Amino acid sequence: MTDKRDLIHTLEKLRPGTTVTDQWPTTAREAALDRLLNALPPPVRRTRDRRMLLTAALTVGFVASGAGVAAAGGLLPESFTGPLSFWSTETKDTVNAQQARRVAQMPGPDGLVLSVWSATAPDGTTCIAPLFEPPGDLDRPAPVNFTLAGGQCARPEDSEPFASTSASTDENDRHTMWANAGNAARAELLLSDGTVRPAILTEGLFVFWYVANRTIDPPTLVGYDATGTVIAERSLPDLTGLEPRVVR
């Protein structure tokens, strides 16, 4: 490290000539220069430390920004969370409908989409709610007009084999179903007229819908593994004629 005496000597060589020197006692002059040197910024060797601190500050900033984005939409309206109050009832308040997020959607009837909303508690309990709503981006705000099509809450240990199914039906015989994925990677709905409709996979469930016809057999749910091989088939229950309700 350079000695302060050397710095003082350097400053003396660089400063312009002046008659003040002859009238400024040497002891006082060196003391003033010494104070000046002590007031200088820290040595250049600390630059690396400052860079590391800046990196940490930027990291914290990104985390805070992410949290802000998540909360940017504000509270979900009561008109939306009210129908999801069964989440709180079934989980003893561990799942809050205010945490609901749209996690998947597929084309629905009459220009609507069937979307799936979900929220997960700290203990892993996950609640889902399929509903019919106007189309749009997955991350759009909660709908004003929608039709709830049932839902459920399940703990991780409640996982069941493929096609263990729950469902809802309405007055127009529109059936909405969610079936455990089990070991299936993909599933399709095979209708009696030969039409094939994909099911959406989300939160460990295959979710789908169809309009039932009392004169034909219900569809079959076909499960495939990751290679595309059929691993299971299940004929879906006939819910026609039942009062509109959720069937589990």
Image (cartoon, rainbow, N blue to C red):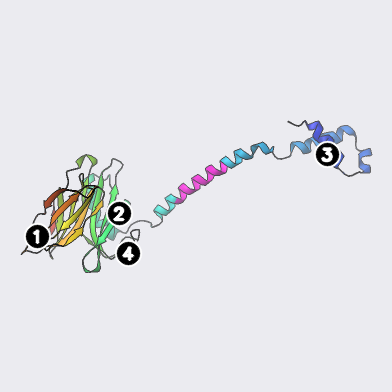
Which numbered disc, 2 or 1, marks the residue closer to the eye?
Answer: 2
* Mark 3 vs mark 1, CA separation in Å: 97 Å
Q: Quadrant of residue 19?
A: top right
Looking at the image, tell me whether mark 4 or mark 2 is earlier in sequence order.
2
Taking 220 as reference, is 116 left or right?
right
Residue 150 vs residue 206, the one in the foreground: 206
Looking at the image, tell me whether mark 2 or mark 3 is earlier in sequence order.
3
Indicate the quadrant containing the N terminus: top left, top right, bottom left or bottom right: top right
User: For residue 61: magenta?
Assistant: yes
Up-down relation of residue 215 to residue 19 (above or below): below
Q: Amino acid at mark 3?
A: Leu
Residue 167 vs residue 196, the one in the foreground: 196
x and y percentages locating residue 156 in the rendered image? 24, 41
Q: Quadrant of residue 123?
A: top left
* Mark 4 vs mark 2, CA separation in Å: 13 Å
**Residue on which disc 4 sits:** 136
Q: Amino acid at mark 1?
A: Glu
**Neighbour tally class for label 2: few under 14, some 14-19, many 20 plus, Cα within 10 Å:** some
**Neighbour tally class for label 4: few under 14, some 14-19, many 20 plus, Cα within 10 Å:** few
